[in-house]
Image (cartoon, rainbow, N blue to C red):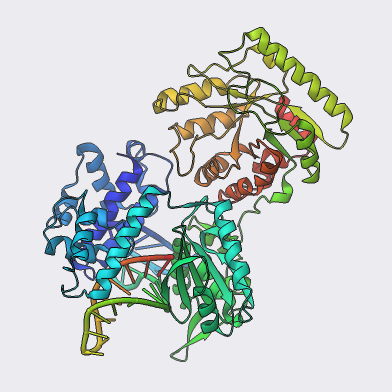
Amino acid sequence: MTNKEIATLLRHVAASYVIKDEKKFRFQIMAYQKAADAIENTTSEIKDLIKENILQDLPGIGPTIKSHLEELIKTGRVKHFVFVMKGIPSPVYPLLDVPSFGPKKAFKLVSHFKLTNPTSVGEDILTLAKKGEIASLEGFGEKSQQDIIRALEEFKKGKTKTNRMTLPYAWETADKLLSYLKKSSAVSRAYTLGSLRRMSSMVGDIDIAVASDMPRKVIEHFVAYPYKERVIEKGGTTASLLLSSGKQIDLMVQPPNRFGSLLQHFTGSKNHNVRLREYALSRGLSLSEYGIKKKEKGKWVTKTFKTEESFYSYIGLDWIPPELREDKEEIQAAHNHTLPHLVEHKDIQGDLHLHSNFLIEPSHDLGQNSMEEMILEALRLGYKYIGFSEHNPSVSKHTPSQTYEILKRKREKVDILNSNNKNIRVINLLETDILANGDLAIDDKSIGLLDALIVSIHSNLGMDRKSMTKRVLKGLSHPRAKILCHPTGRLLNEREGYSLEWNELFEFCKKYGKALEINSWPTRLDLPDIMVKEAQRTGVVMAINTDSHAVFHMKLMEYGVSVARRGWAETKDILNTRPYQEFIQWLKD
DNA sequence: GCCGTTTTCGGCCCGACTGTTTTCAGTCG
């Protein structure tokens, strides 16, 4: 069972408690949801955590859920879960994925109509709604029947599309809306918040905050946005739109003197806010988007904040960078004044993963621009060094001596570039495949022509975890192999990465002085942020690269930097923040 | 069911909006 499947099962248990008695089981419901979060957010497999007896170290997993999960892994089922879910027809659960369907609505419909097929339950309810059979049910009406039809139809459409956005796409969508909003005189300030401000790798919806003394006017302007599909909801301080692309935009408005608490609230994450409010509550303070409530002489008084800094400061915390607001001990660190000094875009001294159009007859795609063009862009970006890392010449189409000849020409080319450019150092690298047996795609004679190798997995992605780990470590153990590129191999919205013994890899990298890449490509962002944090904690160094195949890709560096920041990385953890001499010494070590 | 710089017992974030309601339930973030 994968972690994802286990988390889903725990959410179903929570939903079952909601159906049975939401009030009575209120805290069990929270506990199961929290446990599901924790399991989705860990990089280790539950099976392994049980084997090592450290499952209870996950936040939100206590003795009871721990023993349930042990039973699950051992026997494939949990008696207590079966008991809790008893009497709830299975078609209830798939409905929970449909927006606006919660456990109670799903249960009411499924049990009233005695639906039995979990695969067709959506279609079944759609048919019933279209026949007008739902409006007469208690608690439902004509309007909610129409809402059900729309929700199910939108869900059906959304399923064929990918439903989460990459960062550049989300920024573009948000920017368009921001410039529209700013046309209204009622808008004094407007910002993009939520997961976009936190720079999550994938963004579900777009959150916008506006400072204004005329909230009604702002909302009216917002819902008149010409590119909307429809208005989802509209109230006095918030509103939501569905765009024709299927993406949702949420708006919140507060007056300028309360904007600090709005920024804080709407940046999230939800878990960060929950933790923050618990922290505040233990100090007799109640937080919300309106400000901070405090009891004075028996009465609650709300204090307002213009800035986020003053909001955090009032509850005794340092300002927390948005990328860290994921309930990963950042509140404790802010309390102790031990927040990390995160790496910044301006700290980057060079980009080590660039594909030029040098005719290398590669195994995979060639770049579109010349080395000279990429050097110009690197100078413009203020870099002190860059590494050209084209793919190795294809193994099947070249003999080792042909490969040697190609790489010799590249060596000569790089030497000329270095003698012609005094303001930037050019490093002769190669993105070299680790073959299925762990061998590198070129031989030692050819490797001798290069300053170092960066190595990657591009084939046989389906290997089991043990074999894949052996393969990667073997490839990486070559003394000239220095950086492992896009280590998980994931492609966001397309495929999961391959599986690997991550702790073993981290220990290996630390011991033998190898680095892991943080690939900035928006559908890679690989290492993922949660693994960056674990690698960083282990003491592994990382390199943030763009994997550019054209000059205009080189500006994607900021996305890789955001992943590093979300993983709590400081400049000391990032190889390519080092000055050239220091870096090249590491590379040749 | 989990958790602890006031607690191993007694707490557990805070609010918006919609629809079916006449005071609230359900869903969402």
Q: Can residue A18 be seen here? A: no
**Is A452 positioned to the left or the right of A291 in the image?**
right
- Against A465, residue A274 (above or below) is below
Image coordinates for residue A318, horizontal then vertical, percent: 61, 65
- Against A85, residue A384 (above or below) is above
Residue at figure coordinates x 59%, y 13% from the top left: A397
Residue at figure coordinates x 73%, y 48% from the top left: A347
Residue at figure coordinates x 35%, y 59% from the top left: A154
Question: How many tags in the picture?
Answer: 0
Image coordinates for residue A400, horizontal then vertical, percent: 63, 9
- Against A289, residue A158 (above or below) is above
Image coordinates for residue A500, horizontal then vertical, percent: 45, 31
Query: Considering the image in quadrants, where does the N terminus of chain A appear?
Result: top left
Which of the 4 image quarters holds residue A22?
Answer: bottom left
**Is A518 positioned to the left or the right of A88 in the image?**
right
Q: Nearer the viewer, residue A374 or A76?
A: A374
Which of the 4 image quarters holds residue A391?
Answer: top right
Image coordinates for residue A579, horizontal then vertical, percent: 78, 39
